[in-house]
Amino acid sequence: MKPLNELTATELTAAVRAGRATCEDITRACLNRIAEREKDVQAWQYLDPEQAIAEARARDRSDRRGALIGVPFSVKDIIDTSDMPTEYGSPIYAGHRPRADASCVALSRKAGGVLLGKSVTTEFANFHPSKTRNPLDLTRTPGGSSSGSAAAVADRMVALSIGSQTSGSTVRPASFCGVFGYRPTYGDLRCVGIKEAAGSLDTLGLIARSIDDIALYRDVLLDVKPVAVDKNGAPPRIGFCRTHLWSLLEPSTQALFEDAADRLAHLGAKVSEVALPSEFEGIPDAHRLISGFEFSRNFAWEIEHHWEKISTTLRNGRIRDGLECSFERYLEARDLAERCRQAIGPVIAPFDVVLTACATGEAPADLNTTGNAKLALIWTTVHVPAISVPVFKGPAGMPIGAYVVGKRNRDREHFAFAHWIHRALT
Amino acid sequence: MKPLNELTATELTAAVRAGRATCEDITRACLNRIAEREKDVQAWQYLDPEQAIAEARARDRSDRRGALIGVPFSVKDIIDTSDMPTEYGSPIYAGHRPRADASCVALSRKAGGVLLGKSVTTEFANFHPSKTRNPLDLTRTPGGSSSGSAAAVADRMVALSIGSQTSGSTVRPASFCGVFGYRPTYGDLRCVGIKEAAGSLDTLGLIARSIDDIALYRDVLLDVKPVAVDKNGAPPRIGFCRTHLWSLLEPSTQALFEDAADRLAHLGAKVSEVALPSEFEGIPDAHRLISGFEFSRNFAWEIEHHWEKISTTLRNGRIRDGLECSFERYLEARDLAERCRQAIGPVIAPFDVVLTACATGEAPADLNTTGNAKLALIWTTVHVPAISVPVFKGPAGMPIGAYVVGKRNRDREHFAFAHWIHRALT
């Protein structure tokens, strides 16, 4: 049997239920891994081993055996916790202690999950890099803004982590770190208790090491009875979509995708190319205005009272974009996003999934960037579900995810298609 | 000149700019009114006169002359304040002190507004009645859930108040108390720092004693330069819509509306009847499922840890509705809401506004109810802007609002039409 910290959430809950492991055993295995690796990876904003062990023991003592029993998880530090500091990646909130757990934390704990601590986030889930490093190569970025979440799951410190996504903040780090990153259909998973960046785009993001775990965790956060992923489905109909931004990809990454499209077709999938309507070319600019306008109003208190504690990256980026944007331009951008949300349905309809990229290649060997979000934000803006599936290795041996995009409100079926593609390509 | 506490925000800012009043003068006038009336009305959850005067003096000392300079305002106590308790209408949050001001509070203060205190809300902005009474008749409900906001503005305790609306929580109390209540286009005004009830329905709600003040306050909360309401527009094209719930209205209220439709036509408006597509009859049930499903997940922490402190009204109402609703039924309800959002555009297109009702009649002479929300929630669900305009008196001499509903993203033009109707009917 693998060390407990290397098991998936699905495997861990089975082990606890069968009496093969206690919640405390599992938590200690994860804490040992963290003790060994944290100096290098720096995935944690807050961690109190004693507190985590106490929570695990409470699970062991309880008769409740929820769907996440004994599973160690972390949450990005823009997510409120009633018993741990929550600093939103900003010195403005040093030592901040929220009154309540965020909805997603409360639901995870109710299902038996053990919250180990808070994962590093970039400043207010934006682009200013954090201290976290890619666990597969410490000279590389783990991506952002859910930097610590992806690094901790990839490094076997926890089985699950909750991040968030406004542009590509869950799926890009998942691609860079070689784990599954899931952005749900917009509006499904509640964001109460999470520091909002841009409400019309924000969702939670789930990071795990298996598609089964993603499906399980989604059901826990919906507070419904979990349903296993269907693994007997027919090969999916795949629309391979380069988007108008394909030239951002490194040539070697382009080749990986083209080869994958061929392999999937050989394995029985119906693969054809699909193009997005030309209006989608306006999404990156519309996204910049929407996220900027909303962010710069959302953070009115911080801007008014703590301007000097905001990074220049954020001041000169999203905040300036937002303060310079008129309400009329914001409305035009929102209109374009809304039209594309209507248009994406017929584009995907002939397929089961769209295959595309959410990162330009391997994680950049540069700790001063979190990578390029543009590829992912096209799909974020149109509110569809999507999963970065770890299937490729780049020229340096670093992982790259295939971005598998689905139909709005069809997340459960989407997991089955993503599973098929993962199995086919690995 | 009227006493300062009776002036509108637009009048007050002019008085301060002209040197005819200081911010402190105005705040003291409002505090005197509160001291005189609060024992009866009970509109305030938190009020510290010294703190309010200190804030007013700071405005007087400052060179900044924002769009809301010197205007006393209150916010519903589901809205976070960095320097006042915020208890969300629940003993679970007794003494809770948030770290930051909600976005809307920060923007109001940035523009020169003086926050007097926190207005009474029902428990978590739901249906369990609060202590507040209707200032026009203390035996009657002020409506809910923005009970204190409507009562305080109606009673000349403040010029402006921010409430919120998930069903009819701003416009129904406005109708019952005889003031303007505005629910904006969904998504325009940021809800950061406000205790979410059901995110896919929630908006801020603004309460004031003039349409000019509503327009001014909206621009402040959008953080844009204020634009005055156009008062020279042609008579609007009005669609008079009884909805399928018209039988809920008291006969005397039905008569008021029918008479108003005639008077508006005589004054030059083009008035014709408009019916909603039959699918809209499903909205009340869909709204119950959507709000219940989202609420019961949003409040996972409170439900898990403080069940005994939640009212039976809420436990047996929205929470039970939500916990009993499957995800599939929730999605069906959300689909119906989305279809109606698409359908409402063509329905309103031939008109400038829709004239309808947001309350069944005068405020009930019963402090154990906040009134019926069903009429308002049809329009809330489809995300259009709407204003309760105080134009009618019922058989007991209590006010009733005309509900003037507009087109999504056309709020500014909508103010001009609402102004025309208000002037025509009063």
Image (cartoon, coloured by chain):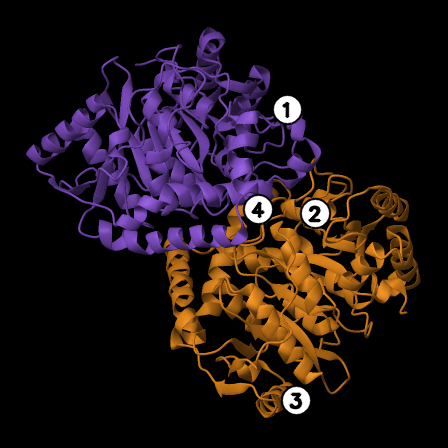
Chain colours: A orange, B purple
Cα separation between marks 1 and 3: 60 Å
Q: Residues within 10 Å of mark 2 (few under 14, many from 20)?
A: many
Q: Are marks 1 and 3 in contact (CB under 8 Å)?
A: no
Q: x, y percentage for residue A121? A: 71, 56
Are discs 1 and 3 both within one chain?
no
Q: In the rendering, which numbered label is found on residue B91? A: 1
Q: Residues within 10 Å of mark 1 (few under 14, many from 20)?
A: few
Q: Chain of mark 2?
A: A
Q: In the rendering, which numbered label is found on residue A234? A: none
Are discs 2 and 3 both within one chain?
yes
Q: Nearer the viewer, mark 4 or mark 1?
A: 1
* Residue type at numbered disc 2: Val
Instruction: Answer with mark 4 or mark 2, whichever residue precedes in sequence.
Output: 2
Are discs 4 and 2 both within one chain?
yes
Tag 4 residue: A299
In the picture, measured across the screen, residue B306 lies left or right of residue B60, that is: right
Q: Residues within 10 Å of mark 4 (few under 14, many from 20)?
A: many
Cα separation between marks 2 and 3: 40 Å
Q: Chain of mark 4?
A: A
Q: In the rendering, which numbered label is found on residue A252? A: 3
Residue A151: name its quadrant. Answer: bottom right
Cα separation between marks 4 and 1: 28 Å
Tag 2 residue: A105
Q: Residues within 10 Å of mark 3 (few under 14, many from 20)?
A: some
Q: Nearer the viewer, mark 2 or mark 3?
A: 2
| Image height of A124 relative to A132, above or below | above
* Residue type at numbered disc 3: Ser
Q: Chain of mark 1?
A: B
